């Protein structure tokens, strides 16, 4: 079994390779999170179109997201926004259009090549209120009570210690602040044999946990007013399913409320709170 540091190093290598591709765009490139190693070798794209959002920058959109957290984040003019796992800066630039010149946007990423690419994008586009910081989501190099809003797009599922990441998110939010996070979760157990292929096929599924467990971690970290703002299934095509299931089993699988889902989750830090609940052992160490 891989250690937490080994998992992080794999993520750095994969996303670093994406960042260094001059025409990188789309999750299903040969070096991306959903490479061609699966038994089916069928590509899939979990990303959602940003094109109609104000502030969208095509050069910063590598197609690595699974939702539109900034669309649901209720960002106001003058807000300080932190984007966890900011990549090439896509959500940061959209957030910048919402928070305006009086606001501040900080992108945090643990892949040096992504930080470099994001900074080049910001410089070339003339952004004065967007900055990018190298750091680990489990141990953010950011002060407490900093952000009005935190966003993140298909990143938390890659973090080995998710509760520690949510506790850190709680810490950097101002009392009364909130997050809007898009992520990949599971509902029910995938059929035998399919889980491993799906982990390769959809990449980040290997770090995904059950939806109910995910929401429970958010609650245990001290957040309130937890709401699933959007949910959609990431459908595995028959080319993948038929490797493991009969036609009858595929039909049964399609009818059940289980599988891989993209969710966008909202939660708020209570007014007057400065410290997360952190009931689980090790989450605050």
Image: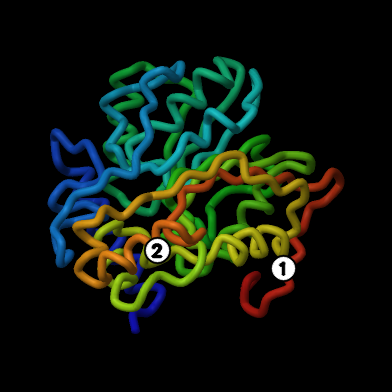
Q: Residue furthest bottom?
A: 1
> Which residue is painted at 68% across and 45% down in the image?
227
Callout 1 secondary element: loop
> Which residue is painted at 43% across and 25% down in the image?
93
- Residue 141 lies left or right of residue 240; in this view the side is right
Residue under numbered circle 1: 278
Query: Could you tell which of marks 2 and 1 lies nearer the N-terminus?
Result: 2
| Distance between the alpha carbons at the discs numbered 2 and 1 | 37 Å
Residue 32 in view in this figure: yes
The label nearer to you, 2 versus 1, is: 2
Residue 50: quadrant of the picture: top left
> Which residue is painted at 24% across and 56% down in the image?
238
Question: Does residue 82 lie above or below 281 as drawn?
Answer: above
Residue 150 in view in this figure: no
> Which residue is painted at 30% across and 49% down in the image?
112
Numbered mark located on residue 133 in the image = none
Question: Does residue 258 lie above or below 270 as drawn?
Answer: below
Q: Counting other residues with Cα less than 10 Å from the Cα at mark 1, is it few (<14), some (14-19), or many (20 or more)?
A: some
Callout 2 secondary element: helix
Percent from the top left, x then y, of residue 268? 73, 44
Please tell me which residue lies in front, 80 or 245: 245
Question: Does residue 39 lie above or below 121 as drawn?
Answer: below
Percent from the top left, x then y, of residue 285? 62, 73
Residue under numbered circle 2: 253
Q: Residue furthest front?
A: 248
């Amino acid at each position: 079994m891989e250690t937490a540091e080994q998992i992080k190093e794999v993520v750095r290598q994969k996303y670093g390779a994406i960042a260094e591709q001059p025409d990188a765009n789309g999750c299903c490139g040969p070096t991306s999170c959903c490479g061609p190693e699966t038994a089916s070798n069928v590509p899939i794209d979990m990303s959602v179109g940003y094109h109609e959002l104000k502030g969208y920058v095509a050069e910063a959109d590598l197609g690595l997201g699974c939702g539109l957290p900034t669309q649901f984040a209720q960002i106001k003019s003058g807000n300080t926004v932190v984007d966890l796992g900011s990549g090439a800066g896509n959500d940061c630039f959209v957030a910048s259009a919402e928070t305006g010149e009086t606001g501040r946007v900080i992108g945090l990423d643990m892949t040096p090549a992504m930080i470099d690419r994001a900074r080049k994008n910001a410089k070339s586009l003339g952004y004065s209120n967007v900055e990018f910081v190298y750091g680990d989501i489990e141990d953010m190099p950011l002060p407490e009570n900093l952000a009005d809003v935190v966003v993140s797009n298909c990143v938390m599922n890659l973090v080995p210690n998710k509760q520690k990441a949510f506790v850190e998110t709680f810490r950097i939010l101002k009392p009364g602040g909130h997050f809007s996070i898009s992520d990949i979760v599971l509902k029910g157990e995938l059929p035998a044999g399919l889980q491993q292929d799906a982990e390769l096929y959809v990449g980040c599924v290997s770090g995904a946990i059950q939806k109910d467990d995910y929401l429970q971690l958010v609650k245990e970290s001290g957040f309130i007013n937890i709401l699933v703002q959007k949910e959609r299934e990431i459908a595995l095509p028959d080319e993948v399913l038929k490797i493991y299931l009969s036609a009858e089993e595929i039909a049964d699988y399609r009818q059940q409320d289980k599988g891989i889902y993209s969710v966008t989750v909202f939660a708020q830090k209570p007014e007057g709170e400065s410290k997360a609940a952190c009931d689980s052992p090790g989450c605050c160490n």
